[in-house]
């Protein structure tokens, strides 16, 4: 066979490269925006909890042990999807779980937990989404891993799966030191 | 898009579309410009100005609050970038991770110009003028043709 002339080969190669780039671009989910907060201290807050809305808690009250901060709301359909996994995790008792009830009403939030089980040691009540804003929350559910010193180590957007939990989150909770990225 | 509609359906209707009121018209103008530059992360192809998502309303309120507090436009942009990342800006900043985005088109243009220049150089040079013997042969051939058309 005759050797392919350069004038056909070069455009073909360029076209191939374009196809590869576009294919990669199409595979990526544009909703997953990397958070600029990874590696930064968790924001300050002063919020009540679902059980004691008038007794504000601060960021410092949660330090000392790494924890999972799960942002949820009673109006959020996907939260229902991931909730059984969190209930299971709560039962196992190995992980400190903190809920953040986001843009919700007190009664609705309480009832939601009463119906589906409450895996959280405590649930912060953020009806105006103030802490949500400082955490860059834009779609519930979102889940953060915050280490013992209060530094955000990881953020997951969307419902948790056992795969994400085992592969990404549990190793972070097990080792207090920051993982090399 | 569908996601946005779903969100809308779930959101209390009163939450969105309440126009912001400023006592100071200069602030209102800055508010308007800023909202046009900032992206709503729920409905990603809409600015904060256009979006009806609940998050957009929250962020609009936040921008308003910061403006009234006396923050500069740059400080407000930084405030949102610190929480939501560069993606919140419609016009991404020029830095290490975005230089390809900004400079890529110019690099491609330069490459294209180079290719065109190279191709035009490679084209065969114009034929050299005829020398004396060639001219004689040409004259002869033309003469022959005139005799035997």
Image: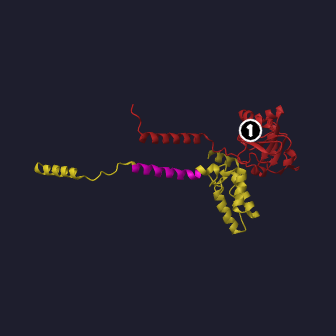
Which residue is farthest front? B132
Residue appearing at x 41%, y 34% in the figure: A3
Q: Please identify the quarter of the rendering in which residue A30 is found.
A: top right
Q: Residues within 10 Å of mark 1 (few under 14, many from 20)?
A: some
Q: Identify the coloring.
A: by chain
Is residue B120 rendered magenta in the image? yes
Is residue A130 rendered magenta in the image? no
Residue for badge 1:
A80
- The reply to whether residue A151 is visible in this rendering is yes
Predominant SS of the magenta segment: helix
Residue B27 placement (x, y as % from top left) = 70, 66
Which chain does tag 1 point to? A
Q: In what element is the residue under mark 1? A: helix
Query: What hue does chain B carry in this figure?
Result: yellow
Query: What hue does chain A carry in this figure?
Result: red
- The reply to whether residue A118 is visible in this rendering is no
Residue A44 placement (x, y as % from top left) = 82, 51
Figure label count: 1
Q: Is residue B131 above or below residue A11?
A: below
Residue B127 placement (x, y as % from top left) = 30, 51
Q: Which residues are magenta?
A: B101-121
Residue B97 placement (x, y as % from top left) = 64, 49
Decide which of A91, B8 is in the foreground and name it. Answer: A91
Q: Please identify the quarter of the rendering in which residue A155 is found.
A: top right
Q: The N terminus of chain A lies in which quarter of the figure?
A: top left
Residue appearing at x 44%, y 39% in the figure: A9
Q: The C terminus of chain A lies in which quarter of the figure?
A: top right
Decide which of B91, A9 is in the foreground and name it. Answer: A9
């Amino acid at each position: 066979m005759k050797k392919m002339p350069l004038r056909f080969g070069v455009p073909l190669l360029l076209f191939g490269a374009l196809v590869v780039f576009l294919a990669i671009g199409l595979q990526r989910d544009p909703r997953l925006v990397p958070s600029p907060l990874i590696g930064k201290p968790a924001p300050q807050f002063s919020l009540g909890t679902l059980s004691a809305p008038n007794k504000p808690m601060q960021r410092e009250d949660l330090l000392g042990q790494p924890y999972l901060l799960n942002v949820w709301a009673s109006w959020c359909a996907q939260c229902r999807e991931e909730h059984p996994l969190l209930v299971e995790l709560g039962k196992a008792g190995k992980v400190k779980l903190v809920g953040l009830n986001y843009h919700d009403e007190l009664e609705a939030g309480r009832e939601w937990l009463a119906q589906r089980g409450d895996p959280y040691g405590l649930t912060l009540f953020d009806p105006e989404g103030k802490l949500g804003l400082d955490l860059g929350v834009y779609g519930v559910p979102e889940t953060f891993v915050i280490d013992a010193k209060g530094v955000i180590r990881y953020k997951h957007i969307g419902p948790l799966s056992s795969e994400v939990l085992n592969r990404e989150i549990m190793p972070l909770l097990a080792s207090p030191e920051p993982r090399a990225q | 898009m569908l996601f946005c509609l779903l969100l809308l359906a779930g959101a209390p209707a009163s939450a969105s579309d309440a126009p912001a009121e400023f006592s100071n018209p200069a602030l209102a103008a800055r508010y308007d410009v800023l909202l046009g530059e900032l992206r709503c992360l729920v409905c990603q192809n809409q600015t904060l100005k256009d979006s009806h998502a609940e998050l957009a309303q929250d962020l609009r309120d936040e921008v308003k609050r910061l403006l009234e507090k006396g923050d500069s436009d740059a400080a407000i942009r930084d405030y949102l970038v610190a929480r939501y990342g560069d993606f919140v800006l419609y016009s991404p900043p020029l830095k290490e991770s975005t230089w390809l985005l900004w400079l890529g088109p110019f690099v491609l243009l330069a490459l294209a110009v180079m290719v065109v220049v190279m191709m035009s150089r490679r084209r065969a040079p114009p034929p050299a003028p005829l020398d004396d013997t060639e001219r004689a042969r040409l004259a002869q051939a033309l003469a022959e043709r005139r005799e035997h058309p």
